[in-house]
Amino acid sequence: MNDKPSTEKTATYTLTDNGTGRTFELPVIQGTCGPDVIDVRKLYAETGCFTYDPGYTSTGSCESKITFIDGEEGILLYRGYPIDELAENSDFLEVCYLLLYGELPTLEQKQKFEHDIIYHTMLHEQINYFFRGFRRDSHPMAVMCGVVGALSAFYHDSLEISDPKHRMVASYRLIAKMPTIAAMAYKFSLGQPFVYPRNDLSYPENFLYMMFSTPCEPYKVNPVLARAMDRILILHADHEQNASTSTVRLAGSSGANPFACIAAGIASLWGPAHGGANEAVLNMLQEIGSRDRIPEYIKRAKDKDDPFRLMGFGHRVYKNFDPRAKVMEKTCHEVLDELGVRDEPLLDLAIELERIALEDDYFVQKKLYPNVDFYSGIILRAMGIPTSMFTVLFAVARTVGWVAQWNEMIEDPSQKIGRPRQLYIGHTKRRYKPLHKRD
């Protein structure tokens, strides 16, 4: 594969001012997949103009080899591998290795990587006391932001970001310790004792064990639920330059330590427009309340003048279908069958809503299919995970993507500190008036 992007094409444009036009050429960079990119790095120097792109939806902020998305075709690739193949055949730690290093591991590499991650899952004991500073009713994401940011105060030996070994140690620590922190946040909210990780359990098994076991009795992890958790983690591990990943890169561009960068990503993910989508699905189902009210809400969803929207249907990026949704749909029904909870009112409501929407011409024509958030919310609800923990679980999965993107940014010689520009529409220069002369 050619790692160097091609710049054989150029884009020509004319800047007209008072009837006089000046023509400029800009390089057009071609990647291995996806749209070409017009290189505007010299635009301001040559023309005195900025580009204007609120939300950066038409702007490429970096080069990356990690994740590729084609929203029109419903494609999601991790390092070139289709997401559905990875979710069906791989496991989360193998995917972590792939995202970090660019290739699937050999058996020996996989065993060593799993060992290194598993033996980093325990937290510094003094961090346990840090939790006591939070109110018991604190949102778990608030706890996650605080505790992850505080890791830099406990692990001073992995803060030199120019040292590849320091970056590796910090990356492993973050991937390993995030489930432990998440489970502790959950236990703290319940007033239950923290459960320490076990080195004889797999990554998803360990998370479920720390979440649901107590010192009072033995706890055996259900393998169907562990596999479902593994798939959820794989499907959410990375998603290109989304809001939280861009936040991690932007924070990292200043040279901030990795723990601070990931804490910034967690804060961005907390927003309901980003990581809170599956929680919004459950809230919507609770609002609908019963199967006989589904037609009413379907009608409201079709009314462009009604602010109500069916959460968990369609996707901002995927205009055709969400490639993660099929895997999650299959996993959802496996979990419901295993737990025998299809008669639980909210889950029964979700299944009926899915059926009606998939058969309705309006949703079919507009390609508003259930997305990954719709099914993951149902799965997590069935597993007994409260909605307040949904985004926390998202953060556990996405940590490896953040870390991989952060490492890639640090190693990119062309990367500069993030400094977006603006279109200023405020006052021009004004003279200061003393207080006694103001109207």
Image (cartoon, grey):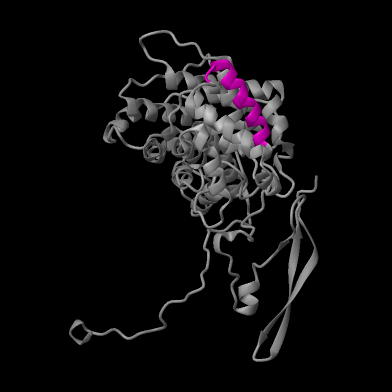
Residue at the image position 78 percent from the left and 68 percent from the top? 10
Pick the front one: 375 or 13: 375
* Apparent side of residue 429 relative to residue 56 in the rendered image (left or right): left
Q: Which residues are magenta?
A: 324-341
Q: Main secondary structure of the magenta part?
A: helix
Q: Quadrant of the C terminus?
A: bottom left
* Apparent side of residue 289 relative to residue 125 in the rendered image (left or right): right
Q: Quadrant of the N terminus?
A: top right
Q: Position of residue 85 (x, y in %)?
A: 73, 30
Any part of residue 386 in sight: yes
Q: Is residue 16 above or below residue 296?
A: below
179 in the magenta segment: no
Residue at the image position 29 percent from the left and 36 percent from the top? 134
Q: Position of residue 12 (x, y in %)?
A: 76, 74
Q: Is residue 301 above or below residue 178?
A: below
Query: Which residue of the protein is positioned furthest toward the left in this rendering?
Result: 436
Pick the front one: 170 or 271: 271
Residue at the image position 51 percent from the left and 42 percent from the top? 277
Q: How many marks?
A: 0
Q: Position of residue 148 (x, y in %)?
A: 42, 38
Any part of residue 163 in sight: no
Residue at the image position 64 percent from the left and 61 percent from the top? 58
Q: Quadrant of residue 354?
A: top right
Q: Is residue 309 above or below residue 216?
A: below
Q: Position of residue 380 (x, y in %)?
A: 51, 28
340 in the magenta segment: yes
Pick the front one: 305 or 114: 305
Q: Quadrant of residue 136?
A: top left
Pick the front one: 161 or 56: 56
